[in-house]
Image: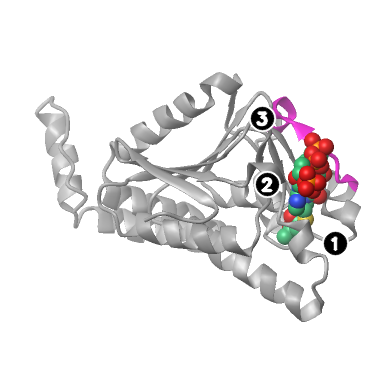
């Protein structure tokens, strides 16, 4: 299927989504979120894709935010509706049973940073620049920036980023844990593909459970989260892949997972 504002290709069990509005620094408008929702649904139903990379087209940006020009004339209800639409797409990415990697090739600001934070891993080029500059526009982040950023880097550092609206570079983003790794720009997609391919080679059924336990557990108190982990640990033993994984180890061979 083809999409209006994004490009999509498949390579070795990895789906690669490229935000494709380079003239607007890949600003995220309603059409982008609708296309992203549709492509994630396609990935969800595609047994040939086990991991996903999201990146931005052009040299400068992953995404420089939600589209300020589209949002300018919104009233209160319109703004809430817009944010609910964005949330629907970001929730879809976060709950997709296949890991999603943001390959951040430049500006990831506002909604762009929020999109990256809804992904599971964030790999940055040395040119990556992240931030939540909404305060400069006299709004607050409306796509999870006040919540996911706090959970990722802690409230003290998050408040520094949110309250100043400052853009932080790749090195600082790595230091505070907002990025998983940083590589030279020309190596970004290779690095993202390398990580995605490792992930794609694992048992898909167990990977889905693993992602769910980490995400669900984050929203529970520790005793409940640990109990949930044990419940899902038990469920792993109902799968064919668990049996194959253990058998292959004992027989000193590579496992052949079927995702069942
Ligand atoms: N929305 C719409 N258009 C945008 C955009 C955005 N978020 N960011 C950049 N653009 C457009 C510019 O308007 C410009 O278009 P024109 O050529 O038609 O004028 C084009 O992209 C190139 O941008 P610049 O000329 O500004 O490029 P630059 O290199 O001088 O600056 C930048 C780069 C610092 C990223 C600057 O573009 C910028 O500050 N962008 C806005 C960043 C921002 O505030 N993001 C948060 C948006 S609000 C949000 O995301 C809310 C939410 O949480 C839901």
Q: Is residue 139 above or below residue 129?
A: below
Report if the beta carbon of the residue with label 1 is closer than 8 angstroms to ligand 1: yes
Q: Which mark is residue 112?
A: none
Q: Could you tell me which secondary element the residue under label 3 belongs to? A: helix
Q: Which residues are magenta?
A: 164-174
- Mark found first going from the N terminus, 3 or 2: 2
Report how far apart the C-alphas of labels 1 and 3 lie in the structure: 26 Å
Find disc 2 in the rendering and name its residue.
113
Report how far apart the C-alphas of labels 3 and 2 lie in the structure: 14 Å
Report how far apart the C-alphas of labels 1 and 2 lie in the structure: 15 Å
One can see residue 117 in this view: yes
Q: Could you tell me which secondary element the residue under label 2 belongs to? A: helix
| Residue 94 part of the magenta segment | no
The residue at the point 32 percent across, 45 percent down is 50
Find disc 1 in the rendering and name its residue.
139
Quarter of the rendering containing residue 248: top left
The residue at the point 55 percent across, 68 percent down is 88
Q: Position of residue 37 (x, y in %)?
A: 49, 62
Q: Quick one: 176 or 70, which is closer to the camera?
A: 70
> Which quadrant would the N terminus be assigned to in this image?
bottom left
Q: Which mark is residue 174?
A: 3
Q: Position of residue 154 (x, y in %)?
A: 72, 46
- Of circles 1 and 3, the one toward us is 1
Quarter of the rendering containing residue 231: bottom left
Q: Position of residue 8 (x, y in %)?
A: 43, 46
Q: Is residue 73 left or right of residue 233?
A: right
- Mark found first going from the N terminus, 1 or 2: 2
How crowded is the residue under tag 1: few (<14 C-alpha within 10 Å), some, or many (20+)? few
Q: Is residue 184 left or right of residue 71?
A: left
| Residue 170 part of the magenta segment | yes
């Amino acid at each position: 299927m083809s999409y209006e504002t994004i490009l999509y290709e498949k390579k070795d069990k990895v789906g690669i989504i490229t935000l494709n509005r380079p003239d607007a620094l890949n600003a995220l408008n309603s059409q982008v979120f609708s296309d992203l929702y549709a492509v994630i649904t396609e990935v969800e139903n595609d047994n040939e894709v086990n991991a996903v990379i999201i990146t931005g087209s052009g040299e400068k940006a992953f995404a420089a935010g939600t589209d300020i020009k589209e949002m300018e004339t919104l009233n209160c209800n319109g703004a809430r509706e817009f944010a609910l639409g964005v949330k629907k797409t970001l929730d879809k990415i976060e709950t997709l049973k296949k890991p999603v990697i943001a390959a951040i090739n430049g500006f990831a600001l506002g909604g762009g940073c929020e999109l990256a934070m809804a992904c599971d891993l964030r790999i940055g080029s040395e040119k990556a620049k992240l931030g939540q500059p909404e305060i400069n526009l006299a709004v607050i982040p409306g796509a999870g920036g006040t919540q996911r950023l706090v959970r990722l880097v802690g409230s003290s550092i998050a408040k520094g980023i949110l309250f100043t609206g400052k853009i932080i570079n790749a090195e600082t983003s790595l230091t505070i844990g907002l990025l998983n790794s940083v590589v030279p720009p020309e190596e970004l997609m290779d690095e993202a593909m390398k990580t995605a391919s490792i992930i794609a080679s694992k048992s898909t059924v167990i990977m889905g459970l693993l992602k769910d336990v980490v995400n669900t557990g984050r929203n529970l108190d520790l005793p409940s989260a640990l109990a949930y982990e044990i419940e899902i640990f038990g469920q792993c033993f109902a799968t064919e892949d668990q049996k194959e994984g253990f058998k292959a180890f004992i027989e000193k061979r590579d496992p052949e997972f079927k995702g069942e």
